[in-house]
Image (cartoon, coloured by chain):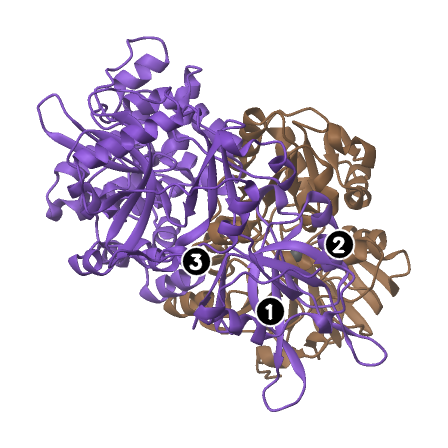
């Protein structure tokens, strides 16, 4: 029988709940409770509690359970990587995204058209998760958190070297390193260990749960210790990891003459670092940089690119100069790294369940 | 160049003096000659070459990037040098990229033809890392801001050899980049460079504020009093170089050479001297207020018109070197003053006069004089100075010799409106406070607060903790580092807020401020936890102060 390929917008469209796939009757990373959700990764702006059914990688399901409790959804199903599953009139598969532990891109095929929703991704090596895999497709939905050519990230080893050099120069000062507690914190610890630093690394209490989660799954993170309140004054010359917001909290005042460091792609521009009062910016990001975004778009072979959360304009323009069809997807509810952290902290402390806008 | 760039980048992020010193010392210790010498020159403002225009940099960049992407990026980053530094993609093999020493860049910039600049610049940018590119672009456009004073950079050099900053200062003016002899000396490898500066800076002597409790213990007969002038403290030094040429310099209190901003004064000081005094603007024999002086200080270029409209003047009050006689600092104050008077009599100059003594019998007398100084120049008087008759001139702030006794400040009760996080050590506190007074809301008979100023000192550490807590607990929105302190309402509709008693030195009309007034030197003198917000002052209280006839200090609340 003659069949015409489905238009991409017949397969996925934006709704107030998030990206909706009508032929499969499911949502991708919905921001409000829905009957059926496919979830790319465990960051709080993508993975929310209260859905009916959730399909995600085993690791992402475990992260959600660790954060929200075992009953975070009515029913869960683990997706094996690269395995095709049929949902309604669609075929769906999950592929590593290289963003954080368990993160996956979701490929959706219907009527001969394949769309890949990348969720968040990066191309830089990360010892805490599987590397990104290119999935050829017709439409690629890319994030654009760092979608400006000024965001080119260098070797993370150089950033860690900056931190260790500062420790040597200021042995009387505690070095507080702000890092998001899911993914970034563990990656920073792994990188510090790779650089040969083997002393105890201290951490803010809010990080303990996810740190333990990684260790239980076999990550070698070396000696880690939660900071006890009474101990703070004695941690001169030590590295202490904390959620970024804690850098500005009363909590940080009790350390000896603290140096405020922050591991984030945003630290690439001086204005942003100064505005946040950061003395030691460390450019370490879990998102693709400009080069990574452009490279990935090209490698997928997609003829049409949908650009979502971040700096859409520059990337859409670049796609068009490459002869690709491109448009921004103005979806609300997905934060940059900064907003994610606020959601994380709120949920991590078990306070209000209000999500960031 | 990369090493120097990394240093100034890190200095910009480092708020503490000791942290800055540690960074600079480590750099000077680890960097070889002559690179560190040129770095020191850049940090002390001793590098001179014609700056490049930003158009040149944009043109270079346009060859390498899509203009739309450039514009979006520039828009996001907000700074041309940084945008280009981040966007620049080096050409050529990484192995060929050899970091160009700052020394070579300075040398090339000094000697090269304008035409050759773009080619050189592109090659340098290719070879540098991002921070290096940023610093180079800032350097050649003249926009390099170094987060330290020249004095602090010299202190770091002195620290290399355990010397005092003043020791470096003494020999500084005889030295030239890249300062090989200076580094050799501080590292103990060479002799002390000759201090052949005919017009050196000598560190100044400072006064302590006079505490009320101290007054009773002082004997008035041991002191003389002068007015405390509201200008800027300067040291005017003139002498002859070995080649017979006259060298005259004007220094700020911290030893910065400010001569180029005051050619009118430099020209007039054509006799050997080292005078300590106050720089003021004087018109028709009358000292103008600090606000007027500020207008001269704010101008970037010194035009003939500016010199005419804001004539600078020195009101001298001490002498550090007298003619050929090098040093009179050990003489008692009274004797120095006599010598100063004699010197100015021998060399009368319209732009220099002697700060008069204020005769008094008792401190009560002086207090009365101080509270309402009379005479033409009263507006430029901040209070008075008490100097022990026998005091030597001791650099720094020695105890017991000089006291400053300021006029009572102006006082107004305001309501706290916003808290802002501070910098450095205070960055985790709301430590900058914006406050307002009441005014009628347009088109209604309600009252609203209008901000009139911002203060970040005047309180104790304990009070800071209380203020910080108050701001954190208050309702109100957050805008980045700023937290709004929204007013509450009592059951009967009265506003609930925190009243701050604000002391300030003066008031000026201002079109930049919503309230139409700008306070000079505001600080929190008391936190009025007890006072209801609606009993704070109204804008009328400040407007009254603008009228010149009412410039008397306001009474503090009992
Ligand atoms: Zn994410
Ligand atoms: Zn995201």
Residues tagged by mark 2 and mark 1 found on one chain of the structure: no
Element type at mark 2: helix
> Residue at the spot x=46%, y=38% of the render?
B11
> Residue at the spot x=75%, y=38% of the render?
A203
Q: Ligand 2 sits in which quadrant?
A: bottom right
Chain assignment, label 2: B
- The percent position of residue A150, horizontal first and vertical second, equals 43, 54
> Residue at the spot x=43%, y=45% of the render?
B228
In this view, B365 is above or below B199: below
Q: Would you say the beta carbon of the disc 3 residue lies within 8 angstroms of ligand 2? A: no
Q: Which residue is mark 3?
A: B77
Disc 2 + disc 3, Cβ < 8 Å: no
Q: Quadrant of residue B236?
A: top left
- The percent position of residue B460, horizontal first and vertical second, equals 68, 45
Q: Which chain's colour is brown?
A: A
Element type at mark 1: strand
Tag 2: Cα neighbours inside 10 Å, few (<14), some, or many (≥20)?
Answer: some
Is A338 left or right of A17, judged from the image as shown? left
Element type at mark 3: helix
Q: Which residue is mark 2?
A: B469
- The percent position of residue B324, horizontal first and vertical second, equals 20, 21
Q: What's the mark number on residue A114?
A: 1
């Amino acid at each position: 029988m003659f069949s015409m390929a489905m238009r991409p917008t017949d397969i996925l469209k934006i709704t107030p709940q998030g990206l909706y796939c009508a032929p499969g009757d499911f949502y991708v990373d919905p921001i409000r409770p829905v009957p059926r959700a496919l979830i790319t990764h465990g960051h709080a702006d993508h993975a929310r509690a209260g859905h009916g059914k959730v399909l995600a990688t085993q690791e992402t399901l475990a992260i959600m359970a660790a954060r929200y409790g075992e009953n975070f959804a009515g029913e869960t199903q683990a997706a094996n990587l690269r395995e095709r599953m049929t949902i309604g009139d669609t075929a769906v598969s999950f592929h590593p995204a290289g963003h954080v532990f368990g993160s996956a891109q979701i490929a959706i095929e219907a009527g001969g058209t394949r769309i890949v929703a990348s969720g968040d991704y990066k191309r830089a090596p990360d010892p805490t998760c599987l590397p990104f895999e290119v999935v050829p497709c017709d439409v690629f939905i890319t994030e654009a958190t760092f979608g400006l050519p000024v965001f080119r990230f260098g070797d993370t080893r150089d950033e860690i070297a900056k931190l260790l050099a500062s420790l040597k120069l200021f042995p009387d000062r505690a070095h507080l390193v702000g890092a998001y507690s899911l993914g970034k914190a563990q990656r920073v610890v792994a990188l510090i260990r790779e650089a040969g630093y083997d002393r105890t690394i201290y951490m803010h209490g809010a990080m303990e749960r996810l740190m333990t989660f990684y260790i239980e799954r076999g990550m070698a993170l070396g000696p880690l210790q939660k900071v006890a309140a009474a101990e703070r004054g004695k941690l001169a010359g030590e590295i202490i990891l904390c959620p970024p917001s804690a850098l500005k909290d009363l909590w940080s005042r009790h350390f000896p003459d603290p140096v405020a460091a922050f591991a984030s792609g945003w630290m690439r521009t001086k204005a942003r670092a100064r505005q946040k009062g950061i003395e030691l910016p460390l450019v370490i990001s879990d998102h693709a940089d400009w080069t990574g975004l452009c490279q990935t778009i090209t490698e997928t072979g997609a003829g049409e690119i949908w650009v979502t959360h971040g700096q859409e304009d520059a990337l859409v323009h670049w796609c068009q100069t490459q002869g690709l069809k491109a448009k921004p997807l103005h979806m609300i509810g997905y934060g940059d790294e900064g907003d994610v952290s606020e959601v994380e902290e709120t949920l991590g402390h078990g306070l209000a369940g209000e999500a960031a806008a | 160049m990369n090493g120097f760039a990394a240093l100034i980048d890190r200095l910009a992020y480092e708020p503490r003096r000791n942290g800055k010193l540690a960074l600079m010392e480590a750099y000077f210790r680890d960097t070889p000659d002559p690179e560190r010498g040129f770095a020191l020159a850049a940090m002390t403002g001793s590098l001179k070459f014609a700056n490049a225009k930003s158009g040149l940099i944009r043109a270079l960049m346009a060859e390498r990037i899509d203009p739309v992407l450039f514009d979006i990026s520039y828009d996001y980053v907000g700074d041309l040098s940084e945008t280009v530094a981040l966007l620049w993609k080096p050409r050529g093999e990484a192995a060929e990229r050899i970091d160009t020493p700052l020394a070579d860049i300075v040398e090339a910039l000094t000697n090269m033809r304008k035409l050759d600049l773009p080619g050189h610049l592109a090659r340098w940018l290719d070879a540098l890392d991002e921070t290096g590119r940023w610093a180079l672009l800032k350097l050649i456009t003249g926009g390099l801001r170094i987060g330290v004073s020249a004095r602090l950079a010299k202190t770091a050099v002195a620290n290399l050899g355990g010397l005092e900053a003043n020791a470096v200062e003494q020999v500084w003016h005889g030295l030239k980049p890249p300062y090989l002899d200076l580094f050799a000396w501080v590292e103990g490898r060479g002799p002390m460079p000759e201090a052949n500066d005919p017009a050196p800076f000598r560190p100044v002597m400072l006064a302590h504020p006079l505490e009320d409790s101290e007054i009773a213990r002082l004997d008035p007969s041991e002191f003389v009093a002068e007015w405390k002038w509201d200008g800027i403290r300067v040291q005017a030094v003139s002498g002859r170089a070995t080649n017979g040429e006259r060298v005259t310099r004007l220094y700020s209190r911290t030893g910065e050479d400010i001569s180029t901003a005051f050619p009118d004064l430099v020209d007039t000081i054509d006799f050997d001297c080292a005078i300590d005094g106050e720089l003021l603007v004087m018109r028709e024999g009358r000292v103008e207020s600090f606000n007027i002086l500020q207008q001269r200080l704010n101008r970037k270029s010194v035009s003939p018109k500016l010199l005419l409209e804001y004539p600078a003047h020195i009101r001298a009050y001490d002498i550090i070197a007298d003619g050929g006689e090098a040093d009179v600092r050990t003489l008692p104050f009274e004797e120095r003053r006599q010598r100063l008077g004699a010197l100015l009599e021998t060399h009368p100059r319209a732009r220099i006069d002697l700060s008069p003594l204020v005769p008094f019998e008792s401190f009560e007398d002086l207090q009365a004089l101080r509270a309402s100084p009379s005479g033409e120049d009263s507006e430029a008087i901040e209070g008075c100075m008490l100097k022990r008759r026998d005091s030597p001139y001791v650099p720094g702030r020695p105890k017991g010799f000089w006291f400053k006794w300021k006029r009572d400040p102006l006082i107004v009760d305001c309501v706290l409106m916003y808290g802002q996080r501070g910098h450095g050590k205070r960055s985790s506190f709301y430590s900058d406070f914006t406050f307002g007074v009441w005014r009628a809301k347009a088109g209604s008979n309600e009252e609203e607060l209008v901000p009139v100023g911002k203060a970040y000192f005047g309180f104790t550490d304990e009070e800071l903790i209380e203020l910080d807590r108050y701001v954190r607990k208050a309702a109100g929105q957050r805008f980045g580092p700023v937290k709004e302190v929204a007013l509450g309402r009592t059951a009967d509709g009265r506003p609930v807020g925190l009243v701050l008693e604000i002391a300030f030195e003066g008031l000026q009309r201002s079109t930049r401020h919503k309230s139409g007034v700008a306070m000079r030197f505001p600080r929190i003198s008391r936190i009025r936890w007890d006072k209801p917000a609606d009993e704070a002052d109204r804008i009328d209280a400040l407007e009254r102060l603008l009228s010149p006839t009412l410039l008397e200090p306001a009474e503090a609340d009992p």
